[in-house]
Each structure stands twice: as structure tokens, then as C-alpha cells.
């Protein structure tokens, strides 16, 4: 098993947190994991993105050139990563901020109005967790429980109060994924 | 060994150094390695050890020099432009026979350059950089686990040979995260000042004097010869490398650090197509695994060197191959990192050209 994911959006959308959380969950399952953030000037304003690889075998290159799965949170990221994706790849899309349709017809696209749903759940910032839930439920790089227990490591002290909202968001994502898988 | 911790490469450097018994950090901030001093600044005071942000890189390296003269395990970390500023100190440290560890998280140059990953300081680190005939031991990990392990070796080698050990990494390794397991803590209570250390005369007959100055040419020649003798000993004992799928290889990539890691993916891509490609990865860049490359030249059709520079380790590979086989090169400059696909495509061009 080797799962490769790129998460991309604006800085502040929780791109890095979602990636680190997934990496931590992979580590908890004793898998090989790499997390590679893009950094530098493009962090401000442009796209922020990270590559996460989870594998049963040692990981060679931590860089993903042609992603088989992406979580895309904004339009510039869709423009950048859509053409690079592998055929039949999974594209989990934050439709709240992306006005256009996906151009390619050879991808598995799950469009989610993530910010609206997050708002309904009472935490607008949890859009990233909804989308992460969708990805985890479809590609199964790790179990949902591992993601939840990783979350407890990240949200400590003052941030502890956000755990339940984020867990709800994750589960909402899992529900959306089940609909997507069932509807096929 | 304890449990695995998911950590940033920059933090791995600091944590491993602390566990290896590093008692003092002196440095000056520079991207992309600021998480290293940040981490030290949090941990060192709590352990009763020294963290000091100097006024400049020149000040920092001279503080390292001073601490090294007492035989204390000491470190500085910086990135390319900062390392350039420290070169005078490196040269003094070399001719003073004092141990220390320097980490360079290389970024794009020359000049102020950028903050993206590069390997363009290979020659500076391996061939000297400062003035005079000297070497530092230079080690280049390619994963964070290897980085965690080699930080211990960096201090051990520095102490064993009274020499500066340079750990060469790049911005990518500093920023990425990977689970690592650290070796056991070194018991610093067992440390005592070595005989040569300048920690007071105590019950010795004479004062210890550490200096890189010797005004008489004959005397300075003797110091130089002694240094060269030490370097030969290191070349004999401390060469480290990894060979990856080399047993039946007909072609070999030579690469270090981040590029070597990407190259392992390239080897996999070639093997999937039935091409017998392997990887030779020097772990010590000085001393360099010359004899190994010389030996492998017999079985190979050609070498393919790849680096994040215009061809610096390439020169050492060519010296080792010594004209026996072709040595091709593919490099990216200014902080651009090639994908495995890019490297494989370039490699195949030479395969097809040779047929």
C-alpha cells in the first residue's frame, strides 16, 4: 500500500494542519510517512500546499509530481494541480470557493460545499476536516480512528475545545464519501 | 531507542544534537533553518546548557571556536550565505585541532540567492572553503531518520579526530516531516575535559595553548604535515556510503542528500522497465568513496551524476572514474528541485544515445 496526496489552498485554510494530521495518523499505524510542505514566498497570497505519502514500504522521494489524489481548497490550486493529476485520480474539491467545474472527465471528482456545511456544523474553519474525511473514507490510507487520535495530539490545551467540532466535520466528510461511493 | 516521533527535519537536527550531548549552541538566524535555533532556544536553557544568539555569523563561529577549545560539544547551524561568513573561523578551527559540529541547510545561491533547497555548497564544504590546506569531515544524510542517527556520529567523529564535522542538508530536509526514532541520550555527566583542553593549568606541568599561528615556516610545515597525517587516517577509516541495487547494475546514478532520495524512486522506475540501474550514495562527502566508484566502473556502462548544482560532486566522481567510463550529469540550479520523472528522462537520453 502506498497512498500519495496533495492538499492545496490558501494559507490559513488549514492545508498544513490537515496534512500533518494525516501524517501523524499514518505514524500511529506504524506506517512509513512523509510530509513535505511547500514553503517560501508562495506561502503569502498564492497557493500553500503539502505532499503527504503513507506507505507500508520505506518511501524514496517525498515529492509528488503526478498526484493520484488531491484535496483542493481554492481556484488557483485547481488551476495548478488539475492538469498534473493521474488518470482516474481522486479530486476532492471545496466547491464553496471554486466557481468553475473540473475540466477533465477522467478524474473521480467529489465536489463538496465544504464551507457552507462547516458553518452549519458551527465551525466555519473545519472545512478542511470535512474534505479530509471524504478523502480518508474513499482512499483509506489510515483508519478514521487514527485521524481522530492524531487530532487529540494537535488540539491540546486551549485548542481542546475544537476537537468535537472537528470530529463532527470529519464524520460529515465520511458520510459524503459514502454517498459518493454508493451512488456509483 | 524510544518511540517514533513525527518531526520536522530542522527540529530533528536540534533534538539529536541535544541527545548526543551538545552543551552549547551559538548562531545567527537565517532561513531556511530558523526552526533549529528556535528549538534549541526552547530546550537548552531547561537542560542547563547554553543557547546564545550571537550578533553575527562571524561572532557565532568564534564563540564555537572558543567553546571547542575547552573540549565541550558545541554546534552552530546556518544556511549558505551565513556559512560563507563563517569560513575564516572554520580555517582557524582546522589548524587548531578542535572539535565542533556545523550544520549547513543549503539554499539557492550565489549571493543572497533564495531560500529554496540547493546543494551548491558542496565544493565549499568538501574542498575547504576557508584558506589553507584543510578538510572537515562532511556528512550528508538523505532521510530524517538518517539525519537523527548521523548527528550523534557527527559529534563522535569531531571528538575522535579533533576536527570540525559539517552536516550538509538542504531546505527541503529542514522543512519536511517524517517519523524518527532517536538513539539513547549520551550521559553528559561522564564528559570530562580532554588533556589538550584550555580549561586551566590544574596539575599539569605546562599550560595548554591552542593557536593556529606558527610564524616559522618550518614549524608551520610540521603543523600542516600533522594535519595531513590526520586526514589520511580519516580517509582510511571513516568513508561511508550506501549502495542501492548495485549488485547487477549496468548503470549507476551518483547523488547525495535529497537528490539521492529522489534517485531511489528513479531506480525503481528504471527497474520496472527492466533497466539495470543502481544508486551509489556517498554518505561522507569528505572523505569521498573514491575506491568504491573506481571498483564499480568495471561493471558499469556509464555513470549518471545528479545534483542541485552545476556539477560539483561530479568532479569527484570523474576523478574516481578517471576516464574509464563516461560520466554524464543532470543538475538543477537556483533552488529548483527535479522530479524523479525529470531525472529518469535525462538518464534515458544517455542510454538511448549510447546505443
Image: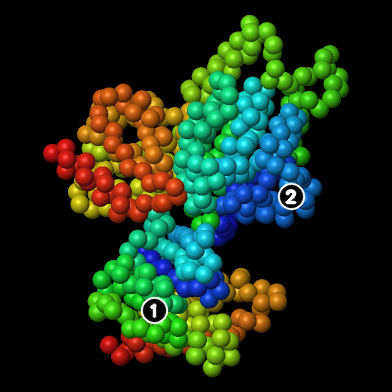
Name the side, left or right, on which B13 lies relative to A172: right
Determine whether the residue tagged by mark 1 lies in a helix, strand or loop: strand
Q: Is residue A172 above or below residue B222?
A: below
Q: Which mark is residue A92?
A: 1
Q: Nearer the viewer, residue A96 or B167?
A: A96
Dot in front, 1 or 2: 1
Point 31% across, 48% down: residue: B343
Q: Position of residue A6 (x, y in %)?
A: 41, 68
Snapshot colouring: rainbow
Chain of the residue under label 2: B
Q: Which residue is mark 2?
A: B44
Residue A109, placed above or below residue B301 = below
Decide if residue A125 is in sight here. yes
Marks 1, 2 in one chain? no
Q: Nearer the viewer, residue B27 or B325?
A: B27
- In the orientation shown, which residue stands out farthest toward the bottom? A120
Q: Quadrant of the C terminus of chain B?
A: top left
Q: Secondary structure at mark 2?
A: loop
Amino acid at each position: 500500500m502506498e497512498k500519495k496526496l496533495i492538499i492545496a489552498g490558501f494559507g490559513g485554510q488549514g492545508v498544513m494542519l490537515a496534512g500533518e494530521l494525516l501524517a501523524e495518523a499514518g505514524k500511529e499505524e506504524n506506517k512509513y510517512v512523509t510530509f513535505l510542505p511547500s514553503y517560501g514566498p508562495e506561502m503569502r497570497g498564492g497557493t500553500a500546499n503539502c505532499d503527504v505519502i503513507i506507505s507500508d514500504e520505506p518511501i524514496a522521494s517525498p515529492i509528488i509530481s503526478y498526484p493520484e489524489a488531491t484535496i483542493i481548497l481554492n481556484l488557483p490550486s485547481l488551476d495548478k494541480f488539475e492538469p498534473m493529476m493521474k488518470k482516474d485520480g481522486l479530486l476532492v474539491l471545496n466547491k464553496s470557493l471554486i466557481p468553475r467545474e473540473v475540466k477533465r472527465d477522467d478524474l473521480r471528482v467529489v465536489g463538496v460545499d465544504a464551507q457552507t456545511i462547516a458553518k452549519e456544523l458551527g465551525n466555519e474553519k473545519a472545512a478542511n476536516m470535512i474534505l479530509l474525511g471524504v478523502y480518508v473514507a474513499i482512499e483509506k490510507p489510515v483508519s478514521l480512528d487514527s485521524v481522530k487520535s492524531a487530532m487529540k495530539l494537535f488540539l491540546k490545551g486551549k485548542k481542546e475545545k475544537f476537537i468535537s467540532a472537528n470530529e463532527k466535520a470529519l464524520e460529515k466528510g465520511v458520510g459524503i464519501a459514502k454517498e459518493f461511493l454508493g451512488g456509483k | 531507542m524510544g518511540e517514533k516521533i513525527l518531526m520536522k527535519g530542522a527540529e530533528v537536527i536540534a533534538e539529536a544534537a541535544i541527545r548526543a550531548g551538545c552543551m552549547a549552541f551559538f548562531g545567527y538566524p537565517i532561513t531556511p533553518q530558523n526552526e533549529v535555533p528556535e528549538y534549541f532556544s526552547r530546550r537548552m536553557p531547561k537542560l542547563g546548557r547554553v543557547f546564545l544568539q550571537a550578533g553575527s555569523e562571524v561572532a557565532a563561529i568564534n564563540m564555537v571556536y572558543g567553546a571547542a577549545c575547552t573540549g565541550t560539544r558545541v554546534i552552530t547551524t546556518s544556511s549558505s550565505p551565513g556559512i560563507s561568513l563563517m569560513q575564516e573561523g572554520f580555517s582557524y578551527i582546522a589548524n587548531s585541532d578542535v572539535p565542533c559540529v556545523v550544520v549547513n541547510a543549503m539554499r539557492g545561491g550565489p549571493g543572497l540567492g533564495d531560500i529554496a533547497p540547493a546543494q551548491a555548497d558542496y565544493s565549499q564544504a568538501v574542498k575547504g572553503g576557508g584558506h589553507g590546506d584543510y578538510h572537515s569531515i562532511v556528512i550528508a544524510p538523505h532521510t530524517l531518520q538518517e539525519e537523527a542517527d548521523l548527528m550523534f556520529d557527527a559529534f563522535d567523529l569531531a571528538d575522535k579526530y579533533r576536527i570540525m564535522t559539517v552536516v550538509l542538508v538542504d531546505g527541503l530536509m529542514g522543512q519536511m516531516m517524517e517519523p524518527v526514532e532517536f538513539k539513547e541520550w549520551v550521559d553528559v555527566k561522564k564528559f570530562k575535559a580532554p588533556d589538550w583542553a584550555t580549561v586551566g593549568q590544574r596539575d599539569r606541568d605546562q599550560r595548554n595553548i591552542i593557536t593556529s599561528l606558527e610564524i616559522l615556516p618550518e614549524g608551520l610545515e610540521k603543523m600542516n604535515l600533522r594535519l595531513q597525517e590526520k586526514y589520511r587516517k580519516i580517509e582510511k577509516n571513516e568513508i561511508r556510503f550506501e549502495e542501492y541495487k548495485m549488485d547487477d547494475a549496468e548503470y549507476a546514478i551518483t547523488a547525495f542528500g535529497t537528490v539521492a532520495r529522489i534517485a531511489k524512486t528513479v531506480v525503481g522506475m528504471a527497474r520496472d522497465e527492466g533497466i539495470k540501474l543502481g544508486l551509489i550514495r556517498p554518505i561522507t562527502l569528505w572523505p569521498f568513496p573514491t575506491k568504491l566508484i573506481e571498483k564499480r566502473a568495471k561493471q558499469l556502462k556509464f555513470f549518471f551524476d545528479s545534483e542541485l548544482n552545476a556539477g560539483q560532486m561530479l568532479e569527484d566522481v570523474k576523478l574516481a572514474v578517471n576516464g574509464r567510463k563516461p560520466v554524464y550529469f543532470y543538475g538543477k540550479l537556483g533552488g529548483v528541485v527535479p522530479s524523479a520523472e525529470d531525472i529518469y528522462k535525462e538518464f534515458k537520453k544517455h542510454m538511448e544515445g549510447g546505443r
